Image: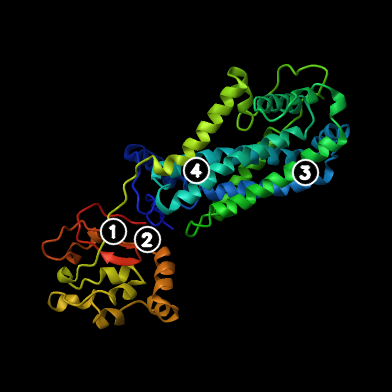
Amino acid sequence: MSADTLRTTPGAGSRPPWPALWRAWEGLEGALDAAFGARANPLRHLGALGFLFFWVMLASGLYLYVVFEGTAAGAYRSIDALSATAIGSAARSLHRYAADSFVAVTALHLARELLAGRLTGPRWFAWVTGVVLIWFLYASGIGGYWLVGDQLAQWSLIATAEWFDALPLFGLATVRNFLSGGQMTDRFYALLAFLHVAIPLTLLFGMWLHIQRVTRADVAPARALALGTLAMLLVLAVARPATSMPPPDYGAVPGAVTVDWYLLFIHPLMEATTPVALWIMAAAGTLGLAALPWLVGARREPVARVDPLNCNGCGRCFADCPSAPWWWSRVPTGGAGPGSRACCPSSAPAAASAPARVRRRRRSARSPSSSLASTCRSFRSRRCAARPSACSPGLPAGRACWCSAATARSTCTGSPGPTRAW
């Protein structure tokens, strides 16, 4: 499939809030298209890569869970013994690097959808649910580090406890529980293991909910992209395997630790500021991102209309929207001369020339309203500018032909404006 076939366009009914930035992003995508092809271009399939990384984490996590000993004394020992074997070290490293990659593609996916304007109109639901999923993503990743039971886990537990102590939820400081080895019981590690299973499963459900209002969501990358990504993770896992820090000393605060900046950056950020400031930044960032669909001010494209008086029978509306006959049957007659054959009820010549696929859809439709909703969602328009003769006399040649699922109208518009494709 060529790059033109997969040409990226802004969200339905909206325009990019920052056109210059979106053009720069498209230029980067075009460069990667030339290098890898559109189907193997990672920037075009960030959502699908996110699902791929989740499945890698799930598969490797199941193996790790089988050999993991969920006790205070055995957690560190089992992970250390696992890392001493080739397969265990590879599984652990795949789990860790897939989690980091998931964070990276999530950030890029969020930036891409924002620059493309794919957050307004009906897409607000996918955007808002995606913002909520960021919390579950970080809760899953940070909780995974706690299960290792090394000094990094101790440092992260203490920092997280200090962060939650800033909230007026507990009467006593919970951080004291992690400064004494007697508090790290087997039951506590069983709770951590349960949370590290429950939160990712909730994340998976949220990912399913996230794409429910996205037509033909891209959830599986092409074979070339998937195999290349898996090969990259394997090479990274072998070249730089994940390792543990020394066992924790709960009688003292850990000193220097090696931080995973993809998942644990919030701890240094809290140390550089205050726990209260981190809560303010987290709340403001979440609410700000969730409110963006109503703040960016992306303009909606004008809804196109069939104008029977100016219809010249070009047939472009008919060719572009398979659900068109249901709308045309409601358009009153009155077209000018023989040109009214494509946009008026007496459009038998145009209907006879319709593709077999379109005719089958028409016959199988249960009702006009349901047919319009289903077929318009699968619509991809062509550019009217390629057929200047399709425009009626006196109308601008740059009009757009497209199907509006929001209004259930298949149309050729006579209004000026740039051409667009979905």
Query: Which circle's residue, 1 or 3, is located before the other in the chain?
Result: 3
Query: Which circle's residue, 4 or 1, is located before the other in the chain?
Result: 4
Along the line of sight, the residue nearer the viewer: 214 or 112: 214
**At 30% from the left edge and 53% from the top edge, which residue is drawn?**
301
Query: Which circle's residue, 2 or 3, is located before the other in the chain?
Result: 3
C-alpha distance separating marks 3 and 4: 29 Å
**Which corner quadrant holds the C terminus?**
bottom left
Q: Position of residue 279 (x, y in %)?
A: 58, 28
For label 3, the crowd category at 10 Å Cα-Cα, with few meaning under 14, some 14 to 19 and many 20 or more, is few
* Left or right side of 301 for 46: right
Q: Mark 1 points at which residue?
A: 303
Q: Amino acid type of disc 2?
A: Ala
For label 1, the crowd category at 10 Å Cα-Cα, with few meaning under 14, some 14 to 19 and many 20 or more, is some
Classify mark 4: helix, strand or loop.
helix
**Which of the labelled discs sits on residue 109, or is there none?**
4
Q: Mark 3 points at which residue?
A: 194
Front tag of 3 and 4: 3
Q: Quadrant of residue 393?
A: bottom left
The answer to the question of whether label 2 and label 1 lie on touching residues, with beta carbons closer than 8 A, is: yes
Residue that sits furthest to the left in the current view:
394
Q: Amino acid type of disc 4?
A: His
Q: Position of residue 85 (x, y in %)?
A: 82, 38
The answer to the question of whether label 1 and label 3 lie on touching residues, with beta carbons closer than 8 A, is: no
**At 71% from the left edge and 27% from the top edge, which residue is drawn?**
161
> Can residue 86 be seen here?
no
Classify mark 3: helix, strand or loop.
helix
Along the line of sight, the residue nearer the viewer: 4 or 126: 126
**Which of the labelled discs sits on residue 406, or is there none?**
2
C-alpha distance separating marks 1 and 3: 51 Å
